[in-house]
Image (cartoon, helix red, strand yellow):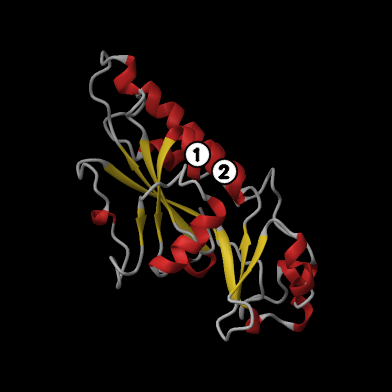
Amino acid sequence: MAFTKHLTTKISTLFKKNKRRNKPACLNKEKKLHLVLDLDHTLLHTILVSQLTQKEKYLIEEVDSRVDLWRFDKGLPNEYFIKLRPFVREFLQEANKLFSLYVYTMGSYSYAQTVLNLIDPGRVYFGNRVITREKSPFKKTLDLLVVDKRRVRNLLEITKYMYFRDEKKSKSYAEKERDESRSNGPLANILRLLKKAHRRFEEELDSKDLRLLIRDPCRQCCF
């Protein structure tokens, strides 16, 4: 995909190869692939309320009537908004059927728990599979995941979700009072790609090099 670094965020996948086709069905069902998700700019966008532009401040009046926008620490210096990316709930519901989901964020544990209380209050999707900056303060590494290290690792890039104004953007979604498409936006597109990769995994296509499961489809996935 033709992306520059500052315009993208990442979804990491760990693929586990089932070498025995004749295993009982009950065991095969437990052989889920692993999907590691970032929070910021992948599933949502967070901003300090004090950083809202003048044209975005209408959101302060709308926040109580919206299901995709939350306000925290009201009245405090670190008061902030969390805006969910369109299609995020559907994405998690569908992805959870095929993958063991993980959160990996450079945010704090407290911040991660705040977000998970919004998108996964029952811990149905992520359980305790959460890695934050307390465990990984300098850089992200999949070595922290408690999984078989022999699994092949892959990386998917997805367009960075920027709902609020950024220094490098001339006008934000919020300022335009619009948002990404739910049915044909980045999360919907990446879900289709992941489902395709999972089907190929089940069919054991290219099983000697599981990186091929996502390499070719990525070329067609323009977000």
**Label at residue 176:** none
Task: Establish if 67 lies above or below 72.
Answer: above
Q: Position of residue 34 (x, y in %)?
A: 36, 41
Q: Is residue 26 left or right of residue 173?
A: left
Give the residue at x 40% y 46%: 127
Asked if residue 124 shows in the view, the reply is yes
Q: Secondary structure at mark 2?
A: helix
Task: Establish if 166 lies above or below 32.
Answer: below
User: Which amino acid does the dot numbered 2 rest on?
Assistant: Phe
Give the residue at x 51% y 45%: 219
- The quadrant in which residue 98 appears is top left
Q: Nearer the viewer, residue 185 or 218?
A: 185
Asked if residue 158 shows in the view, the reply is no
Task: Establish if 147 lies above or below 178.
Answer: above
Calculate the distance from the C-alpha at mark 2 to the C-alpha at mark 1.
6 Å
Within 10 Å of disc 1 (Cα), the crowding (few <14, some 14-19, many 20+) is: some
Give the residue at x 47% y 42%: 124
Q: Nearer the viewer, residue 156 or 38?
A: 38
Q: Position of residue 143 (x, y in %)?
A: 23, 55
Give the residue number, with chain letter if any, for mark 2.
91
Q: Position of residue 204 (x, y in %)?
A: 35, 24
User: Which amino acid does the dot numbered 1 rest on?
Assistant: Ala
Give the residue number, with chain letter if any, for mark 1.
95
Q: Is residue 20 left or right of residue 196?
A: left
Q: Nearer the viewer, residue 103 or 42?
A: 103
- The quadrant in which residue 200 appears is top left
Q: Is residue 175 left or right of residue 145?
A: right
Query: Marks 1 and 2: in contact by CB < 8 Å?
Result: yes
Within 10 Å of disc 2 (Cα), the crowding (few <14, some 14-19, many 20+) is: some
